[in-house]
Image (spheres, grey):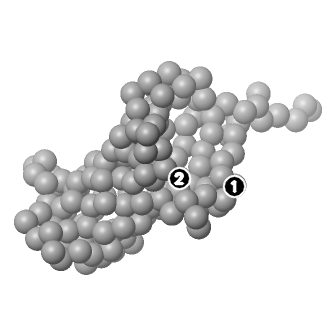
Amino acid sequence: MAMAMALPRGFEFTETMAGTYHLSGQPSEQRRFSFTVTAHAEDLVRHLRDGMARLTGTLEMEGFADEVPLEGTIEIQPLTKKIIRYEFAFVGNDGEPYRFAGQKDIQYRHLMTSWTTLPGSVYDGRGEEVARARTRFDAKNDLMPWLASFRLVGRSV
């Protein structure tokens, strides 16, 4: 009986971003906002075309969504569209569904800031903005773990 061999086909990595959020209309009341996600693209060739990968992970939105699971997508297109876009859904402490949407606009003149800063908004089930967040990837402390998390994922043949 021949052993199945895993051939690299896609990839995955883990990323943590942390910062603050405020409820819409209350910018002076900043609270902790952080998420840890695993991005997974099943097909590297397709990913190179559309930039899309699946996200799973957890969100800490202090007092609003405490350590809740999240699911969504990340669009990684730093060369063609000059963006990295995160969108994920989660359920708040109130049991209601919410969605986060944020985008890094890549600027080669400000490469480090534009690659590490993610502004975004939280929307309720009706699509109304309920909060604004700003997170950062801590390159000094998290770059090596992030790089170490990259791995090719295979498929059996």
Q: Secondary structure at mark 1?
A: helix
Which residue is more in the foreground, 64 or 4? 64
Residue 93 visible within the image: no
Left or right of 19: which side holds 63?
A: left
Instruction: Kindly report the distance in space between the C-alpha atoms of the residues bearing marks 2 and 1.
Output: 13 Å
In-front residue for pair 76/98: 76
- Can you tell which mark lies on residue 114? none
Dot 2 amino acid type: Thr
Depth check: 36 or 98 in front? Answer: 36
Q: Quadrant of residue 106?
A: top left
Front of the two marks 2 and 1: 1
Q: Measured from the top left, where is residue 12 in percent x and y?
A: 60, 45
Residue annotated with mark 2 = 38
Q: Quadrant of the N terminus?
A: top right
Please state which amino acid type lies under the numbered disc 1.
Ala
In percent of width and height, residue 146 lies at 61, 56
The residue lying at 46 percent from left, 33 percent from top is 78
Residue 113 visible, this angle:
yes
Which label is found at residue 148?
Answer: 1
**Residue occupying image coordinates x 47% and y 44%:** 111
